[in-house]
Image (tube, grey):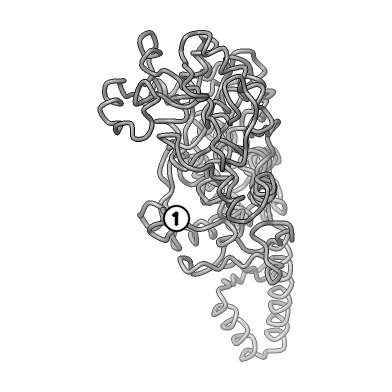
Amino acid sequence: MQPLFIYNTVTRKKEEFKPLNPPFVGFYVCGPTLYSDVHIGNCRTFTSFDIMYRYLLHLGYKVRYVRNITDVGHLEDEVAGEGEDRIGKQARLKQLEPMEIVQRYSFGFREVMALLNTLPPSVEPTASGHIPEQIEMIEKIIENGYAYVEDGNVYFNVEKFAEHNNYGVLSGRSIEDQLNNTRELDGQEEKKGRLDFALWKKAKPEHIMRWNSPWSVGFPGWHIECSAMSQKYLGNTFDIHGGGMDLIPTHHTNEIAQSVGCCGQVPVNYWVHTNMLTLNGQKMSRSLGNVFLPVELFTGKKLSPHSPSATPSQALLEGKHPLFDKAFSPMAVRFFMMQTHYRSTLDFSNEALTASEKGFERLMDAYKTLQSIQPTDKSSEDISALLQKCYDAMNDDFNTPVLIANLFDCVRIINSCNDKKLTLTKKDIETLNTIYNDFVFQIMGLKLEEEQSKTNAVLHSVVNLLLDMRNQAKADKNFGLSDEIRNKLIEAGIQIKDSKEGSTWKLN
């Protein structure tokens, strides 16, 4: 087996993947904070890590994939660790229990992930379900001298930690640079340093979610949850930790610090981060009004009535959003996301999505064509080389754009063979089927959606019926009717090719 190389954010280079305990792999990804509907940026992140998970499984690794759900401790001001709890705020505004909010949006999150055909993680722990583990970890950090207690709050002492450790190992920023670019403490005078962050917060009277601890009745900080849960399920040091690149400066930097401060060990060997999204070249933000939800883009699938995005009139996803001219199937959107490398910015636009949709249909149509190709004794192409190129692409830091380019070489060969321009042996056809089954369906996680399959089946029946009518008209020397049928089909976007063997067609 050829080696897999993964880009490590810590070293800023691709490194050969060497698991700590092969064939076992520990894989942790920071999950969503479920105080609202899952957004399209979440979808890009979790789809990217789904492909990595699928490829590791394909290579034969036994992967424990842990993706948490944040349901406590994520405050409105992420950097300062201040403000109202995001979930608690929604609970107060909607006059619901916080766990009702979490349950509501957890259901919607999993439903959208299922629409995108992502595999469920091995473990999906919640922060609120692991309060004892977080308290125990905080106690160890205090014992090791890297945290202090002030009026029921527990803070991590960053500058003390930085005396013997590289606090900016992930971000690449020195402690001096971070201090110079951090605002003065405002209302946080109890902190010893500007970079110090909360491990435990004393609950104010109006704070809904609270637990008993050795220091106060309160709640854990946002960062400690991932350290505690990853340690519980994957050990003090594990293989891969993933998340969006926006988590690097604060959340993941603090995760490393508190894990080292607790156990004295580097927690992760490979840090992997996905890049951000843009829309028509602009960064997505609520202030610009260009943020949209997956259900505003998707079409062709029913939502459960329990989904937070469902309405009585929305039995079927219609994908209506003023930023887009039309809706797209979840599989077309998944395919679109893979046409850009996970470390590159992904730009959504009508033109890009429409082009991707056509490419997805070509890929799937070629697979159906492949099933009817008859083998010959000699081959015109080296299909085994194409299979190796697919592996080469994925082994190069999960390079899906290059993989897709190789898959369209397969499409070209299949269509040329169908047009009698190339020949393939039985072994070649088997290899092409292997490429589709392994890379398109298993690793990329693409599939023909039910509604699309039904539509294609109806289209094939109707067009073939019209071609039969046209052939009969030609046999009856009714050339006017024959030409009219041909012209109407061309106007509808259907190409017709006449040959000695009969008439064939395809969509433009």
Q: Which residue is mark 1?
A: 348
Report x, y in % for residue 125: 67, 32
Report x, y in % for residue 472: 73, 83
Q: Please tell me how many numbered marks the rendered image carries.
A: 1
- Disc 1 residue type? Phe
Eyeballing the image, is 45 above or below 132? below
Report x, y in % for residue 39: 54, 51
Q: Is residue 507 left or right of residue 245?
A: right
SS type, badge 1:
strand
Eyeballing the image, is 168 above or below 218? above
Q: Residues within 10 Å of mark 1 (few under 14, many from 20)?
A: some
In the image, what residue occupies the spot 42% across and 30% down?
250
**Residue 368 visible somewhere in the drawing:** yes
Image quadrant in which the N terminus is located: top right
Image quadrant in which the C terminus is located: bottom right
- Please identify the quarter of the rendering in which residue 130 is found: top right
Q: Nearer the viewer, residue 468 or 433?
A: 433
In the image, what residue occupies the spot 69% across and 61% down?
301
Q: Is residue 287 left or right of residue 353?
A: left
Q: Nearer the viewer, residue 54 or 141?
A: 141
Eyeballing the image, is 446 above or below 178? below
